[in-house]
Structures are given as C-alpha cells and as structure tokens.
Image (cartoon, rainbow, N blue to C red):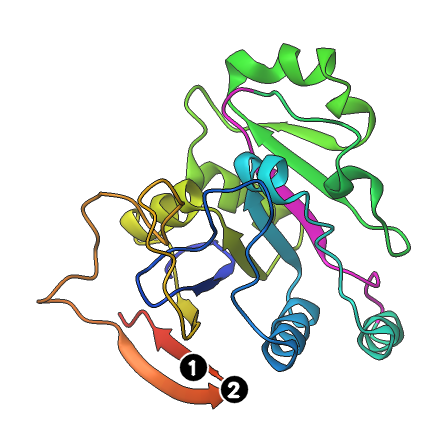
C-alpha cells in the first residue's frame, strides 16, 4: 500500500468450490474452533474490522474480540477491548437493532460509510443515533474511506466480507495481505455467495500474490498471501 492508507488485511473462509456461505437462511460454519480462535487473535491485532451491509443483514455479526485475555491485553495497551466496527452501505438502509450496533465490549466505536445521497436514509433508519455516519462521497469511494480511517488513527484494517466488499477491495488493489481458510467440503449451489464476483483484478496470472504461509489447522488449511509491490 502506498500513501496514507491503513494496512489492509482481508480474512475469509471458503469451501473447496469457492463459496463463503450457503444459499439458506442459516449461517454456514466453514471453519473450526481452532481457526475461529486464530481469527480472533487477528481481530485483536487490528484497529478496525470492516464488513459490508449485506453481511450485517445475512449474518448479524457482533464483530468483537471473543477472548477475555485478548480484550484485557488490548486495554492494558491503552486500546478499547475490541477494534472499531466499520461497515459500508450504498443504500443507507441498515437495522439499527443489529448486533453490529448493539453488541459492545466496553467502548466500541461504530462507523458507517455511505454515499452522500444515502445520508438522510441512515438518519431515517435510526443508524445515526447508534453509530457515526460518514459521507464517503457521491459513489462511496474506497480510497476516501481508507483516508478517513487513517485520519481516525486506524493503522491496521481487517476486512471480513462479504462478496461485494471483498471484490471491491481486491479489484481496486487495496489489499496488503490475504488470509484464506479453505474448508474440506463443497457447497455446490450457485445461489450461494462466492468469495469474489467478476472483476478485473490486479493479481492475475501475470501478477501473482506471494504465498507467505500454508498451514493446516485441523481439517482447514490457512493460505496467507502477501500482495507484493
């Protein structure tokens, strides 16, 4: 990454056929307890965690550090128990009662980035009462989001999904590191969300990421890639 942007770490778990969830209403657990704990440690090492609005709607994530020891260690270091929670929404329509807004571990900051035309909608939905709503420009520009996060002291950003957000960050070349956990089974349903959608990616067959680590974690394999220059 160049310029005044945070270090961006993308974290995702997928099936052998590239899906990150099922097509049904219940969240599909792709990982195992040991890998969930690894992800928790990565979360604890970051200043902010970002997901898209659709992930909030589908999964209702809390986005908190689970381990009390890790929360305590962050507090000792002068940090809040959990990183700042960040989401992107183009429509501005979010449920202000979602766990993203209501689940806290101490003083957890919540940031909602939306395009200028959606600002009034976030107010109408009650989002502005439970989070800081930030104008991200006419079309919700990712460099604008990253620059604003930098101004707020975010040096290390963890991006957890979903498909649209992961695709946006990767096609824009705004990723420094990728953690991809591969589960040992297939989903086999084209209605389910994939790791990424169609797009022109900076990293293609002529511009490969660097494999920094390949590690079995129980029946899951962690692939850790560095984006390179």
For the point 49% across and 50% down, the residue is: 161
Task: Report the residue at 41% width, 75% height from top.
Answer: 184
- Disc 1 crowd rating (10 Å Cα; few below 14, some 14-19, many 20+) is some
Q: Which residues are magenta?
A: 78-91
Q: Quadrant of residue 49?
A: bottom right
Q: Nearer the viewer, residue 107 or 191?
A: 191
Q: How far across and down, in percent of the image, does residue 67 sit?
A: 81, 73
Q: Which mark is residue 217?
A: 2
Q: Is 73 located above or below residue 110 in the figure?
A: below
- Give the residue number, with chain letter if any, for mark 1: 221
Q: Which one is nearer the viewer's eye here, 40 or 208? A: 40
Q: Which mark is residue 160?
A: none
Picture residue at 70% right of the left edge, 70% below the top: 44
Q: What secondary structure is found at the residue carrying circle 1?
A: strand
The alpha-carbon separation of the residues under discs 2 and 1 comes to 6 Å
Query: Could you tell whether 147 is left or right of 85 in the image?
Result: left
Quadrant the C terminus occupies? bottom left
Whether the magenta-drawn stretch holds residue 39 is answered as: no
Q: Is residue 223 above or below residue 151?
A: below
């Amino acid at each position: 990454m160049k310029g005044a942007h945070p270090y961006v770490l993308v974290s995702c778990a997928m099936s052998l056929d590239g899906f990150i969830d099922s097509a049904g209403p219940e969240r599909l657990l792709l990982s195992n307890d040991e890998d969930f704990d690894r992800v928790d440690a990565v979360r604890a090492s970051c200043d902010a965690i970002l997901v898209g609005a659709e992930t909030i709607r589908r999964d209702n994530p809390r986005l908190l550090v689970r381990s009390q020891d890790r929360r305590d260690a962050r507090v000792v270091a002068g940090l809040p128990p959990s990183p700042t929670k960040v989401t992107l929404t183009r429509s501005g329509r979010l449920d202000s009662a979602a766990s993203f807004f209501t689940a806290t571990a101490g003083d957890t900051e919540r940031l909602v980035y939306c395009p200028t035309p959606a600002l009034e909608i976030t107010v109408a939905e009650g989002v502005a009462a439970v989070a800081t709503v930030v104008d991200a420009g006419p079309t919700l520009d990712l460099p604008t989001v990253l620059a604003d996060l930098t101004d707020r002291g975010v040096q290390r950003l963890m991006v957890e999904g979903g498909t649209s957000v992961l695709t946006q960050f990767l096609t824009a070349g705004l990723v420094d590191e990728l953690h991809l956990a591969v589960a040992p089974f297939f989903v086999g349903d084209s209605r389910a969300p994939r790791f990424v959608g169609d797009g022109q990616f900076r990293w293609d067959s002529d511009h490969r990421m660097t494999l920094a680590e390949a590690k079995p974690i129980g029946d899951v394999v962690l692939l850790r890639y560095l984006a390179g220059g």
